[in-house]
Image (cartoon, rainbow, N blue to C red):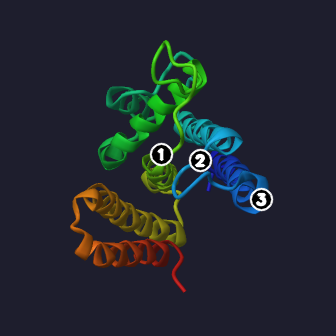
Amino acid sequence: MTTKDELLKTRFLLNMGRINGLVRLLYSNEALKPAGLFQSEGVRADILRSIVVFLHATFEVVLRSRIPKPNKSLSFYSRTDLDKALTLSGIDAKPFAPLYAPLTQMAKRRKRIVHEADFSGRTDVLSEAWGVADDWQLIMWFMTVEAFYYQLRISVNAASVVERTRFERLGKAMRSHVDFGNQLLAFPKVPPELQREALQKFVVTLKSIVATLNPT
């Protein structure tokens, strides 16, 4: 492992640890309880927005780490941007393509938070409540940033067997998370007599994701 790879690994783990510290704060502080099921408001919602910004910054650190001549003018809001950055780094972009959609979505949300205070319209005077769709996206972005990091290490032949296994598990968990999102979208149309069964499927899917990411 080169010094560059060691530095990237140290910085990535440090940043993810800082982000996880914010997540732990949300669940350990009584004053930061959710306003309702899958609904965050006030300070709790703003901490979640801060996590999005920090998570995107962590992704940028990983992506910029291999570019020979760092260029602060580079932006990462589209598939073309990501392809360009990886090509400049001498890395085949094809293996990263499945991660592009959530990465560009995260970049756009980060931009809205940083430049527009997360207002959805120019005349808004209140920010939207942080809801279930936001929670779902943030979880996906967590997994995507980690997967991007491991794919980069695989691409430069720096990944260990443990890291390659983690990457495979992340891919499986992300596919299950998409299934969970589809179940959430379909739930409002589920007849009342079948909602209990639908909720049980939610639990099964979530347990599958947890088991995939944290095998015993």
Q: Which residue is mark 3?
A: 30
x and y percentages locating residue 198 in the rendered image: 30, 73
Q: Quadrant of residue 13?
A: bottom right
Label annotation for residue 70: none
Say which amino acid is labelled 3. Glu
Q: Earlier in the sequence, mark 1 or mark 2?
A: 2
Q: Is residue 154 left or right of residue 130?
A: left
Q: Earlier in the sequence, mark 3 or mark 1?
A: 3
| Mark 1 neighbour class, 10 Å CA radius: few under 14, some 14 to 19, many 20 or more | some
**How far, Cα to Cα, is label 2 from label 3?**
13 Å
x and y percentages locating residue 167 in the rendered image: 45, 63
Is any part of residue 83 visible from this angle? yes
x and y percentages locating residue 43 in the rendered image: 71, 40
Q: Are marks 3 and 1 in contact (CB under 8 Å)?
A: no
Q: Are marks 1 and 2 in contact (CB under 8 Å)?
A: yes
> What residue lies at 59% left-to-right and 47% top-to-bottom?
40
Say which amino acid is labelled 2. Ser
Say which amino acid is labelled 1. Asp
x and y percentages locating residue 5 in the rendered image: 62, 49
Q: Which residue is mark 1?
A: 134
**How far, Cα to Cα, is label 1 from label 2?**
10 Å
Label annotation for residue 40: 2
Is any part of residue 71 visible from this angle? no
User: Split into 4 quadrants, where in the image is the C terminus?
Assistant: bottom right
Between 63 and 44, the one lying in front of the other is 44
Q: Secondary structure at mark 1?
A: helix
